[in-house]
Amino acid sequence: MFQEDGKVTVSIRQLHPHFVGEVEGIDLRQPLATADVDAIDEGMDRYAVLIFHDQNITDEQQLAFTRNFGEIEHAVGNSITASQGRRLGTEMADLSNLAQRDQIFQRDDRRRLFDLANRLWHSDSSFRVVPAKYSLLSARAVPAHGGNTEFADMRAAYDALDDRTRAEVADLVCEHSLMYSRGLLGFTEFTEEERKTFTPVRQRLVRTHPVTGRKSLFLASHAGGIVDWPMSEARSYLRDLSEHATQPEFVHVHQWRLHDLVIWDNRQTMHRVRRFDDVNEVRDMRRTTLIGDGPTAEQTPG
């Protein structure tokens, strides 16, 4: 709970032993006071995931709310949807199962098959040189069954490592690409332009939060290699770490309600969406994303 001049402005109730807070006392359709912005930032540092219920906001209101916390990342280079086929502007990532004219994707639509990898554990934009800070996802239409989002606390997962493993992961650098995560589901056919767009980038495996100083594992299904390791060994090791980090004790399941807005810190969490009947039911989710603090690792020359 946070106060300004003795007056409570935002109330946060913890939902999981390690993380996740449910926020009350704020209307995201309205401009935020500085105290509210600070309270939410402090809540993110502590809980890593914040849930706001009953926020029936427009795209413009979501964008305005997002800008309180940093610079918005443009959703370019994160999909195979051509620019002329977008439903939304580039300041929003379209996480729906809808094509440009709001029709549901057919089962064999290439865009749908690409997006199925969102059902794997990941951190948003870890495939960019500068990975994302916060993601803010607004539920505009939710299916009757399924489509939950699971979050895993990468801080708690790091804390639970034994001393030997902590020493082993301390200086490791991984290679991340959308081609790796999609390849796990058999999506391997990319155009030359897409392969160039999805060129692997390097990310440290252990990150330190700039405010709290807490360390966390920076894992994702986008991670397909470890620098200077044989690929098979690297992928086996990363799979072991991911299995450790996504044990039930580190995971919270969010069951979406219409007009929920959820913020998560990609520096401290992983997440995945769960299966739903996406060829018959609409799930319209709109994400704004904040550019992160900077690169986590040096990139390859050239």
Image: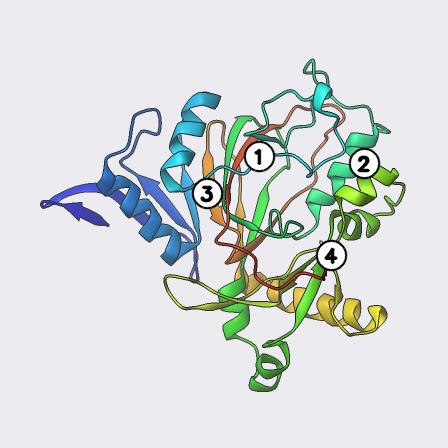
Q: Where is residue 87 in the image (x, y as percent from the top left)?
A: 64, 20
Q: Where is residue 192 in the image (x, y as percent from the top left)?
A: 87, 40
Dot 4 corresponds to which residue?
A: 302
Query: Residues at badges 2 and 4 in contact (C-beta under 8 Å)?
Result: no
Q: Residues within 10 Å of mark 3 (few under 14, many from 20)?
A: many
Rounded to the nearest whole Å, what is the CA distance between mark 4 and mark 1? 24 Å
Q: Which amino acid does label 1 sit on?
A: His
* Disc marking residue 181: none
Query: SS class of the residue under badge 4?
Result: loop
Query: Mark 3 or 1, which is nearer the eye?
Result: 1
Query: Mark 2 or 4, which is nearer the eye?
Result: 4
Q: How crowded is mark 1: few (under 14 residues within 10 Å), some or many (20 or more)?
A: some
* Disc marking residue 74: 1
Q: Which amino acid does label 3 sit on?
A: Ile
Rounded to the nearest whole Å, what is the CA distance between mark 2 and mark 4? 32 Å
Q: Residue at x 70, y 24 (%)?
A: 83
Query: SS class of the residue under badge 1?
Result: loop
Query: SS class of the residue under badge 2?
Result: helix
- In-image side of 33 versus 119 (left or right): left
Q: Residue furthest top?
A: 101
Counting residues from the start of the chain, the first of labels 2 and 1 encountered is 1
Query: Residues at badges 4 and 1 in contact (C-beta under 8 Å)?
Result: no
* Disc marking residue 263: 3
Rounded to the nearest whole Å, what is the CA distance between mark 2 and mark 3? 26 Å
Q: What residue type is labelled 4?
A: Gly
Q: What residue type is labelled 2?
A: Leu
**Depth order, front residue of 51/75:** 75
Residue 62 appears in which quarter of the rendering? top left
Query: Residues at badges 2 and 1 in contact (C-beta under 8 Å)?
Result: no
**Depth order, front residue of 249/191:** 191
Dot 2 corresponds to which residue?
A: 113
Counting residues from the start of the chain, the first of labels 3 and 1 encountered is 1
